[in-house]
Image (spheres, rainbow, N blue to C red):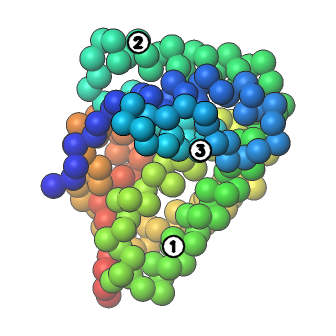
Amino acid sequence: MTQAFDPAGELTACQAMADEFDAYLTSDVLYWQMDASRPAGDQLPKLTVSGFLERACRLRAAPLTSSQRLVLDESVRRFEQARDRQPARYVARVVHDLRGRLDAWQWFLDDYAKQPEEQAPYFPAQAHTRLAIELLVAELENHPEAAEPARRLFALDERLRADWINGAFVWHTSLAPGFPRERFWWLYGRLKQSE
């Protein structure tokens, strides 16, 4: 059974990322170390465009309380305001982030091709990278910078489909309604472990 999704930490991270997003876009740092820490004292994740987009996407899919939904909506609003104040820097940051995520996804698929038995069980944990790619590509819609990453993603998806077995949602079922199978097909199934 997949572990239940706990929105508290993700909401804290989204709030902190929204707080620092203007400064992040102004900087030349791709992986921004945030100042805040989680209530339990844990360090927050590094801020990237995809880090925020992934968390916001999962939170939108999750069953949240009305107060949690307000926190999410406010964080998304502040993120979008910062994005809209610095559109050129935002697109450049998305392109850079997307290249890194595509590299990471290719490395996982390369490792899987060499050792399917060992790597296939890690797919649910790695699927967040494919989600990040999906969300970053969507951010580049109508931008010329989208063409090359889209071609690369198509080729990687062809590799994934060749060893894909349709099946159950890979994360906790409470999130599934926010990820329709038609768009997020790679969240519904598993990789073959042997021929």
> Label 1 belongs to which residue?
109
> Label 3 belongs to which residue?
46
Query: Residue 3, percent across and down?
Result: 22, 49
Asked whether 22 or 129 is in front, the reply is 22
Mark closer to the observer (2, 3): 3
Residue 117 in the image: above or below residue 101: below
Q: Earlier in the sequence, mark 2 or mark 3?
A: 3
Name the residue located 44 percent from the left edge and 29 percent from the top edge: 12
Name the residue located 61 percent from the left edge and 36 percent from the top edge: 34
Mark 3 Cα within 10 Å, few/some/many (few <14, many 20+)?
Answer: some
Q: Is residue 165 left or right of residue 126?
A: left
> Label 2 belongs to which residue?
70
Query: Residue 192, percent across and down?
Result: 32, 76
Give the Cα separation between the discs numbered 2 and 3.
23 Å
Give the Cα separation between the discs numbered 2 and 1.
38 Å
Query: Residue 103, percent across and down?
Result: 64, 64
Q: Earlier in the sequence, mark 3 or mark 1?
A: 3
Q: Quadrant of the C terminus?
A: bottom left
